[in-house]
Image (tube, rainbow, N blue to C red):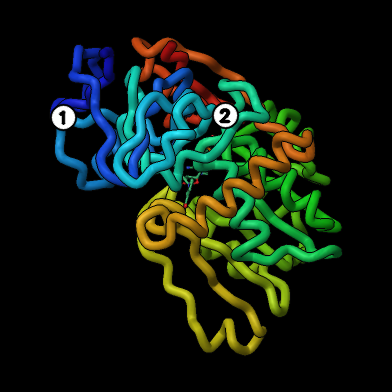
Amino acid sequence: MKAVVLDADDQFRITEAAVPAPGPGEVAIRVAYAGVQYGDVLVREGHFPIPRPFVPGFEASGDIVAVGDGVDEARIGEQVTALIGGGGYAEVVIAPAVLAINAAQVDPRTAAGFGWVTPTAYDLIHTVAGVRPGDSVLIHAAAGGVGSLAGQFAAAAGAQRIVGVVGNADQVDYARQFGYHQVLAREEFPDALGGEKFDVILDPIGGDTRVANVARLAAHGRIVVYGNIATFEPVTVSANDLLMQGQSLMTYNSNLASQTNPKRLADSAARAMSLVADGSVRIDITAEYELSDVETAIANLAGGQTRGKSIIRVR
Ligand SMILES: NC(=O)c1ccc[n+]([C@@H]2O[C@H](COP(=O)([O-])OP(=O)(O)OC[C@H]3O[C@@H](n4cnc5c(N)ncnc54)[C@H](OP(=O)(O)O)[C@@H]3O)[C@@H](O)[C@H]2O)c1
């Protein structure tokens, strides 16, 4: 089968590889499309210690073609989207059966775009921050994969004010369609907000933005840290200062959850999938690449040239 390999020289190359077989508790999926996500950028930049050569691709849609011991054979033929630790940029991928999420109600492109971003956005808004009707919510990288979904989940949860922050004026217009009442270009944050504070802030950015975010939390507000797009430099926050305002700093790590509590992540994914299937939440796929263009797809995401979700056509 064809597979894209990331080598020690940071280059992505298409190679011929043996078709993998599922082990106990696993399924083999014939890949239709794979999703592109920020983890691809982090892996390419060496932020995860994954030995090379390595077949990247952390999310893939397709149909189950084989099951390992302990997995119901009736799942063969099922349309799924898989949350995986790699291997998605290939014609066949192995996934834990529990994280091969049924995707029969959506088309294979949408299923690939669903990826990790949809359960992540769902969990950030519902499970972690617990957005309630009337809350105000501030979301960074609002035009991106997670951001374009988090705005919609916040709206569906009844948030009364949802503000997004994006990289430039073009992204401002784009992001507005995803539930946002106001979208700011990055250079306008935080000054354009005046003295406004928020009940919930989603922060995948880090650094000075994280410091500014903490200052924008309302009493009893929750800030959820879930990435470090701008910098991995640590930010110090005083627990005593948070306590004085009844505020909480929370984190979310879906990759860890996939290892420590995959069933809980799968349950969130299934709930998010039903909201996508019934049209409450829309995954906006804006770019489709061939398997031979994985490098370009990831470079475009790293360079801030993408919106919504990018996918790779494998079959
Ligand atoms: N913790 C978890 O479980 C989890 C799960 C999934 C994703 N994530 C994280 O969520 C974040 C978004 O992931 P994604 O796959 O949906 O990517 P994405 O949002 O589609 O792409 C990243 C976006 O970051 C923005 N950006 C780039 N450089 C920036 C900078 N210096 N400052 C502020 N914004 C910048 C760009 O948007 P603009 O063009 O608008 O600037 C870009 O589109 C990433 O940090 C990823 O690691 C975490």
Where's the C terminus, which quadrant?
A: top left
In this view, 284 is above or below 123: above
Residue under the image location 37 percent in, 62 percent down: 260
The reply to whether the C-beta atoms of the residues labelled 2 and 1 are less than 8 Å apart is: no
Q: In the image, is 65 to the left or to the right of 167? A: left
Where's the N terminus, which quadrant?
A: top left
Q: In the image, is 4 to the left or to the right of 133? A: left
**Residue behind mark 1:** 53
| Mark 2 surroundings: few (<14), some (14-19) or many (≥20) residues within 10 A | many
Residue type marked 1: Pro
Near-viewer residue (170 or 311): 311
Q: Marks 2 and 1, Cα distance to the nearest angstrom?
A: 27 Å
Q: Secondary structure at mark 1?
A: loop
Which of the 4 quarters of the picture holds residue 223?
A: bottom right
Q: In terms of sequence position, does the residue under pointer 2 or pointer 1 come before the other?
A: 1
Query: Please, which residue is most extreme toward the front here?
Result: 73
Residue type marked 2: Ala
Residue under the image location 59 percent in, 87 percent down: 243
Q: Looking at the picture, how far across and down is residue 19, in whole percent? A: 24, 21
Q: In the image, is 215 to the left or to the right of 14? A: right
